[in-house]
Amino acid sequence: MWGMKHALSLTAQSSLFALSPLDGRYAPKLDSLRGLLSEAGFMAHRVQVELAWWLALSDLGLAEFPPLSAKARETALSWAENFGAEDASRIKAIEATTNHDVKAVEYFLKEKAQASGLKELVDAAEFIHFACTSEDINNTSHGLMLAAARQRVMMPSMQALVDKLAEMIQKTASLPMLSRTHGQTASPTTLGKELANVRARLRAARDQLKAVVILAKMNGAVGNYNAHLSAAPALDWPAFSKAVVEGSLGLTMNPMTIQIEPHDYMAQYFDAVARFNTIVLDLCRDLWGYVSLGYFKQRLKEGEVGSSTMPHKVNPIDFENAEGNLGLANALLRHLSDKLPVSRWQRDLTDSTVLRNLGVALGHSVLAYDSCLKGLGKLEINEQRLSEDLEAAWEVLAEPIQTVMRRYGLPQPYEQLKALTRGKGMTQETMRAFIAGLDLPTEDKTRLLDMSPASYVGLAAELATHEISQA
C-alpha cells in the first residue's frame, strides 16, 4: 500500500495527484481556460497592464521620462507577447523573496529592462508601476481575464448548446409529446416546443452575460490619485487613467472607487453565468427523466460499460456529470457574487484569495456544458414510445371538450368531465361516446370527434419554429 511519503515524492505535474479534478481527470477538457485564468495567466495579464501604463507614461510629457523609441516600445511589448512558462517561473522565484506577487511582476519587468541592453529602457525602469497600487494592476488584469474568458470560452460554449438545441428543435417542432405537470398526464405539446422553451431561456441568460460592462480602475491607493498628484500636480490624471483603461486595455473606467474596484460588475457576470447554469441543470434533469420514460434512447459506444454489475444498462451519465458540475460551479459563483462586492472600509484582502478561484468556477461550468452537449449528441428519439404514451392518455381531451361546452353554455361542463375522467382510464371510444351525446353545433362536435391526444398540441409547432428563427 502506498504511503503519503511515496505519493508526495511523485512529480507535481502528474494529473493523478492533482487535488482539483479540473487539473487532474478533466484537465484536457479545460485547456481553453488554463492560459487565461491560471496563475500564469494572471501573471501574463499583469505584465500586459504594467506595460500599458508604463508605455502610456512615456507619452505623458514628463521631462524625466521622454517618449520611448519605436525599438524600445517593440522590445517592451515583446515581453507581454512572448510571455511563457519560463517568465512565470521567474516571477514566482522573485515572489519567494518579496512575498508579494505584484511587486514580483514589477521586479521581473525591471530585470527585463536591464537585460534589454537599451539605455532608454534601463533609465525608465523606475517608472514601471509608477504611482500604482497593486490593485490597479490586479483589478485591470482580472477584467482582461474575464473579458477574454467570456469572448473566447464562455460565449462559444454557451452558443454551442443554443445551436445544438436549434438543430434538435428543427427536427422535432411538430413531434407530439405528452406533457407531465406535477408528474401527471397533461395537455400535449411537441418535443420541439419543450426544447424551444429551454433555448429561449438560455439565449436570455447568454445575452445577460454578454451585456455585462467590465470595469477597471487605475486611481491609486484609495482611489483619489494621491500619489499621482504629489508627483505631477498639473497633469489630468483621471483623463490619463481613463485613456489607459479604455484606450489601451479596452475596459471601461470606473471613476469612483476605494482601493479596489468594487466588483459589482463581477457579481453581475457571475450571476449571469449561474443563471445560465441553472437553466442547463433544469434541462439535464428533464432529459434524464425523458430517458427514463423511454422517450429517448442513447447511442451506444463500443467498449463502454453502463454498470459494473448490470450489463444491460446504458446510463445517462453525461447529463448526470453536467448536473454535478453545475452544482459545484454555482456554489462557487454564488459565493463570488455575494462576497466580492463586500470590503471593509477602503480595503481588505478577503477578495484576493477568493479571486484565485475564477478558473475553478468557470471551469466547472465549461465542463458541464461539454457534458450536456455530449449527452445531447447521444440522444435518439423513440417515436414509438412517445406515440404509446399519447394513445394511453385520452383523458387529456377533457380540457378541450369542457372548454367548448363552456362556450355554448352547456351545464356544468367542468364537473361533468371531472366525473367522467378523474382517476379513471379513458379510451378513444369512451371520449367519443361522451362527445356524441353533447348538444353542440355540428362543426364543433366534428372537430372534437376528430381530435386525438397527438393532434391536441395547440400552437406548439409554430412556437418552436419561431424560436429557432432567433439567433
Image (cartoon, grey):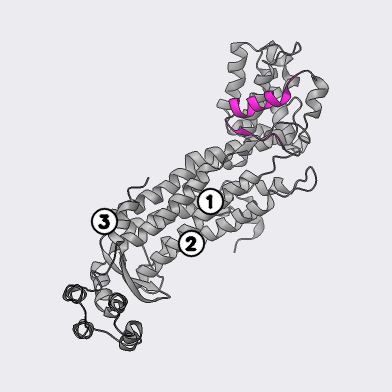
Residue type at numbered disc 3: Lys
Disc 3 to disc 1, how far (Cα)? Answer: 28 Å
Helix, strand or loop status at disc 1: helix
Q: Is residue 431 magenta?
A: no
Residue 461 can be seen in this image: yes
Instruction: State the image quarter where residue 68 is shown.
Output: top right
Residue 187 drawn at (x, y percent): 33, 72
Disc 2 to disc 1, how far (Cα)? Answer: 15 Å
Precedes in sequence: disc 2 or disc 3: 3
Whether the residues at callouts 3 and 1 have beta carbons within 8 Å, the answer is no
Residue 137 to residue 70: above or below: below
Helix, strand or loop status at disc 3: helix
Instruction: State the image quarter where residue 437 is shown.
Output: bottom left
Task: Return the residue at label 3.
Answer: 171
User: What residue lies at 42% left-to-right and 63% top-to-bottom?
Assistant: 317
Residue 129 drawn at (x, y percent): 73, 26
Helix, strand or loop status at disc 2: helix
**Residue at far right of view:** 230
Near mark 2 (Cα within 10 A), the count class, few <14, some 14-19 or many ≥20, is: many
Which mark's residue is nearer the viewer, 2 or 1?
A: 1
User: What residue lies at 68% left-to-right and 15% top-to-bottom?
Assistant: 121
Which mark's residue is nearer the viewer, 2 or 3?
A: 3
Magenta range is 235-256
Name the one closer to the observer, 39 or 397: 397
Near mark 1 (Cα within 10 A), the count class, few <14, some 14-19 or many ≥20, is: many
Left or right of residue 238: residue 27: left
Name the disc covering residue 323, or none.
Answer: 2
Instruction: State the image quarter where residue 94 is shown.
Output: top right
Whether the residues at callouts 2 and 3 have beta carbons within 8 Å, the answer is no
Q: Is residue 243 magenta?
A: yes
Residue 42 can be seen in this image: no
Task: Return the residue at label 1.
Answer: 273
